[in-house]
Image: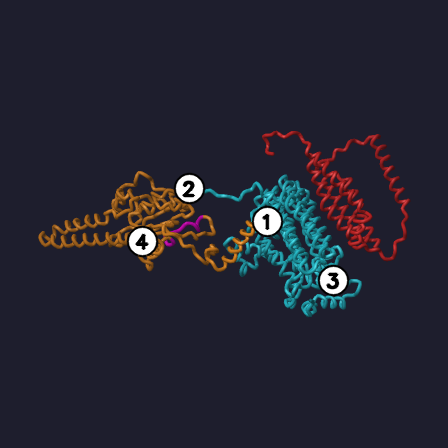
Chain colours: A orange, B red, C cyan
Amino acid sequence: MLGSGIIQGLAVTAKNFVGSFHDPARYTTQEYPEVLPTLPENYRNFPFLVTENATDPMGTMRCVACQICEKECPPQCIYIEKSKDKKPDANGKMQLYPAVFDIDTSVCMSCQICVEVCPFDAIKMDQVFAIAATDRFTGLLLDRAQLAKPNSYYHTIHPTEATEVDARLAEEKRIAEEKAKAAAAAKAAAPAKALPGDLSRDAGRATDPGLAKASNRVPGQTPAGQQAGTVPSPSNAAGAPAGPAPKPTSPTMKPPGAGGPAASGS
Amino acid sequence: MTVVLAIIALVLLGSAAAAMLSRNLVHSALLLAVSWLGTAAFYLWAGADFAAFAQVIVYVGAVSMVVLFAVLLTRQNPVGDVQVEPASRVRLTAALSVGACVAAVLFAAVVSSDFRPAPAQAPTATVKQIGLELMGPYGAALLIVGVLLTVALLGAIVLAASEPKRNPEDAP
Amino acid sequence: MISAAPESFLERLPLLAGDLIARVVPAPLLWFVTSLIAIVAILAIFGLLFAFLTLAERKILGRIQNRPGPNRTGYFGLLQPFADGIKMLIKEDIVPRDADQVLHYLAPVVLVSLALMTFAVLPFGRHLVPVELDTAVLYFFAAGAATELAVFMAGWASHNKYSLLAAMRALAQLISYELPLLLSVVPVVMLAGTLSTTGIVAAQGGWKFGFIPHWYVFTPWGFAGFLIFFTAALAESNRSPFDLPEAESELIAGHLTEYSGFKYALFFMAEYFGMTALCGMGVTLFLGGWQAPCAFLEVIPSYLWFFAKLLTLLVLFMWIRGTLPRLRIDQLTRFAWKFLVPLALINLGTVAFWHLTVGWGGALQLARWALALVFVIVPFVLIGRRLSAGVAPRTYRYAP
């Protein structure tokens, strides 16, 4: 009959109206600042630097300022300055660390290439989307202190990835320690046979390459990180002349004198 | 009361004069609507509220729409200067003679009707009385007016429908 | 059955206030002061009602659409209308250079003033009519008809082809639905025997068996008349599904395109005032005005009953807005002329029959009701079938 469709329509909207007060299926709004959205685990937005613990963020950063992410970043939004001194890393080896590590989030496109190429699992993707700034340039430039976040935070946002990374790093650390024990045992055994004065130099040289090899061993990269094969160790990078590609100019407003310190880090 | 009547008369005649003198056709039509409102105010002053509201509904609400539609749909440029031919002696004599005839008719009508002095209390005609009068003694007039309007409508439709043959490829 | 409640204190409050004013104000100024008070009261009450109607509309539409309405400004968004008012006031008032300045300025003013003038004859309560007119219904529709001129002025003065076209379409819609509106009111006037709104409300007084009110909506012809009046009122106030003249996707905003800031707010206000006034008239003509539904409910003052019924009708307007899609201009004019006008005319005939058979008693009353129902339902079904002949119910075929 004419008008029956209208009555049915009115019934549907009435059901929607009444249901919106008690039925969550009929009230699909999440009122944003009070109710944060549940993000999927694979959601990514802007990178951050992983530190081992929260109490000493600057001291336990995994980043060794190898500048691979800086070179691989497509919009070149990362700016790194190596430090002048070295600090021991998680395995005890002395490594450089980034004195300056800036990411320009107005340029960053969250492509994750920096994560894929990092040999040290030092930079990972964060999930921040509420980092609006009130000025146009400096507010969107995140520095090292703002980028450093602890591994526990990494576990909260990407649990499966974080456990996998932790397992891998623990495995490497174990292998490195075993190697070190084996080398120490060999070293302890060898001087017993040779003269003390002669072989101390040899012993020192014998242990060094072992440790260098252990830290050199390419960690189990994700399949996308094929560049890992070409990753040189930090000491080699320091010794080699500046690579064929000149160091990219800093994307920020830093004065040219401070920027572009070239590959001669230390 | 005379002050009110003076104001109403001023509005009525002033807007009618302005409607005639205005160059902008749409302004003329709207000023004509104002003069109809003035007529309605006059009816209200005279105590005929039914006639006043009927005047507003019919004239201001409907006839003004007809006039405006006609103005807008038939003229190319209703805002521009109305094409007025230059004054000539023929036009002058024609205008004066037509004006004189109309004035003579009105004068004769005014003189021949007898104006009785109005009673102290203005007679109020209720809507019921008006209805009875319309259906009774003035029923014929009502029907003739209805027929007249229908004829006008049909004429308008005939005029509008007799347009050049449309290209059959256009939408119907 | 008139109970003693009508003389309760709350009910007589307006009379007492009138007496107080008459004692305070000298005689020559009395009508001026009472008129001024009535005007100020109407502006204040219906202005606030307009403000909260906009909020209620947004919240109701939101809930129908599975979302909250505005709820950030104040608790539950209660300050939203004031925020909107401030926004409208501080917006820049842009008038096109070639626009007709006088008409552009006058159009919203005329529209709002005429829409407000229609409130003068609505009986808000037993003793609460701003102006008692013998021809109140005619006055109401006269003021409503004059608003169409303002719509044209708005479209013309904007000096914008599309505004003019949209104003023409709006006028076509307003004129088309004027006829069913008036025709559906004529039966009520015929049965009540008077054009005065107070008289029409009084004619709907009393209850059958003590609890069924004599409101006209509870009769077959009254129900049909109410539906026709309600549909025509939706169209006269440019509400969905007849909001072609002002919908944002239709020629931007139709005749309102070139209006910004407070003038746009005035148009908006005029639409809501028109809507409220038409709902008020519908309540007066068909829903018994300020009459209470049952005898013992008369303890609640009459003006509260009027506002309750008014708010019910307004919520019904919003409910329909949230449900029905928009009609095209040819669909709505066809609906008016081919469906509503014939039905309204047939309704007139039904009411004539009803009026002439008042004297039938006993079992013949049942026959009277049955015949009236037949006269109402059969043309509705027949004309409906005839008009929707070519339109089959939709069958959806999805890809396998």
Q: Amino acid at mark 2?
A: Pro
Q: The C terminus of chain C appears in which quarter of the rendering? A: top left
What is the spatial separation of the Cα atoms under label 1 and label 3, in whole angstroms?
Answer: 38 Å
Give the CA separation, mark 4 to mark 1. Answer: 55 Å
Q: Are marks 4 and 2 in contact (CB under 8 Å)?
A: no
Of B103 and B121, which appears nearest the observer? B121
The boundaries of the magenta stretch are A137-146
| Quarter occupied by the N terminus of chain C | bottom right
* Label 3 SS: helix
* Mark found first going from the N terminus, 1 or 2: 1
Q: Are callouts 4 and 2 both on one chain? A: no
**Contact, CB < 8 Å: mark 1 with mark 2?**
no
Distance from the alpha carbon under mark 4 to that under mark 2? 44 Å
In screen coordinates, is A18 left or right of C1? Answer: left
Q: Which residue is mark 1?
A: C240
- Residue for point 74% across, 56% down: C193
Within 10 Å of disc 3 (Cα), the crowding (few <14, some 14-19, many 20+) is some
Residue C34 disc label: 3
Disc 1 secondary structure class: loop
Mark 1 or 3: in front is 1
Q: In the image, residue C370 lies at what x, y percent?
A: 64, 55
Q: Is residue C383 left or right of residue A217?
A: right
Q: Is residue A145 magenta?
A: yes
Callout 2–callout 3 Cβ contact below 8 Å:
no
Marks 2 and 3 sit apart, C-alpha to C-alpha, by 73 Å
The amino acid type found where label 1 is placed reads: Ser
